[in-house]
Amino acid sequence: MTDFLIIGGGIAGVSAAARLSHLGSVVLLEAEPALAHHASGRSAALYEPRYGLAPVVELSLASGDYFRSTPNILSPRGMMILGKAGEDAAFAHDIASMELPEVSVDEARALVPILNPQVVKRAAKADHAWDIDTDLLLQGFAREARQNGAQLLTSARVTAIGKTATGWQLQTSAGDFAATTLINAAGAWVDEVAKLAGVAPLGFQPNRRSMARIPAPAGLDVSGWPMMFGCGETWYAKPDAGALIVSPAEEHPMPPHDAWADDMVLAEGLARYEEMVTEPVTRLISNWAGLRTFSPDRSLVIGRDVDQPDFFWLAGQGGYGFQSAPAASQLAADLLGEGRSPLGASLIAALSPARFA
């Protein structure tokens, strides 16, 4: 009998395995052949702790000490918001919520010389955003978990979940498992896992987001460019390994599945990016998509199920999974351990599944 059984091998599940491995025995089950196959493996990987709703921001800020104390996890990136004529309200909202000081278009073009001054009318830029080495973060948590005896099993798709007098019995493609507490960190599949366990789903919605990698515009060195957003998050672009990742930033509801980019949506997003710059997109190096899964109120859900307390939700990371993972996983361990957390009671309540009861 395992103390903690985690379903889902993305950053949420793996970080939880690391934290819980200090409290008892842990088994993590990932359906795919590798960890972080779905959303976690397709992230833009930016730590901008002021991005998101208030509970998300508080979690992300609480993750800062972990990021700063772990060598090489963060590297400087910065971020820039760009606005066209007629977008003053959206621009003002974005720079206020993310605390970005406005700069002149000339100053913005000094950093990103391809910006089109005929179209870009407002710009804001700050340095409080960093690239996350997602593989280093994930592997660090995985190593911590394994060093404490946790089993992280891949190709272990859950096919049945049954309630027992002492906890849970699971049938999987890798064998049968029994556990005292079940942690649902299954990403886009969290409601499907809940149904399988006989627990009421909470109404999570996976949403597709597409990405394209394009060559560095005009052969320029883009390594020092900030991540750029069209205000209102209508598109974004981020340097990546000598190229640019460009996203339409779409949010299209989808059933849980192994997502792929929609060609038309990608083309529309690339056109929004192209409008703001002087260099056209001539070819794609690659493209992909991931599912960002949100709860009904778009904040994470972390806590014991109201009706089934040995079923624990760690879900609804949306686009904030990596930047909130250190604090989210520690909160999960605190709640599953002694039940106390240094995070405020109001934040814990804002994240609890009880808010949907």
Image (cartoon, grey):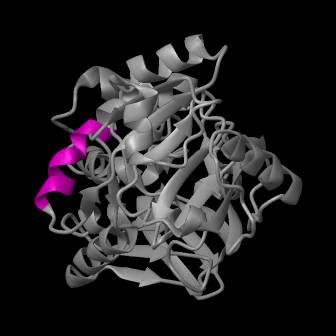
Q: Tell me where residue 4 appears, x and y as whole percent.
A: 37, 65
Q: Tell me where residue 211 appears, x and y as whole percent.
A: 66, 59
From the viewer's perspective, is residue 321 above or below residue 223? above
Q: Quadrant of the N terminus?
A: bottom left
108 part of magenta stretch: no
Apparent side of residue 201 relative to residue 93 in the rendered image (left or right) = right
The single residue placed furthest to the top in the displayed view is: 89
The residue drawn where x is 54% and y is 39% is 229
Q: Nearer the viewer, residue 234 or 296?
A: 234
Q: Nearer the viewer, residue 122 or 239?
A: 122
Q: Nearer the viewer, residue 89 or 329?
A: 89
Apparent side of residue 29 relative to residue 60 in the rendered image (left or right) = right
Prevailing secondary structure of the magenta residues? helix
Q: Tell me where residue 106 appears, x and y as whole percent.
A: 42, 32
How many numbered tags mark residues here?
0
From the viewer's perspective, is residue 308 above or below residue 216? above
From the viewer's perspective, is residue 109 above or below residue 260? above
The residue drawn where x is 49% and y is 28% is 354
Magenta residues span 60-69
Q: Tell me where residue 129 appears, x and y as whole percent.
A: 32, 45
65 part of magenta stretch: yes
The single residue placed furthest to the right in the displayed view is: 264
Q: Quadrant of residue 287?
A: bottom right
From the viewer's perspective, is residue 304 above or below residue 145? above
Residue 79 visible within the image = yes
Q: Quadrant of residue 62?
A: top left
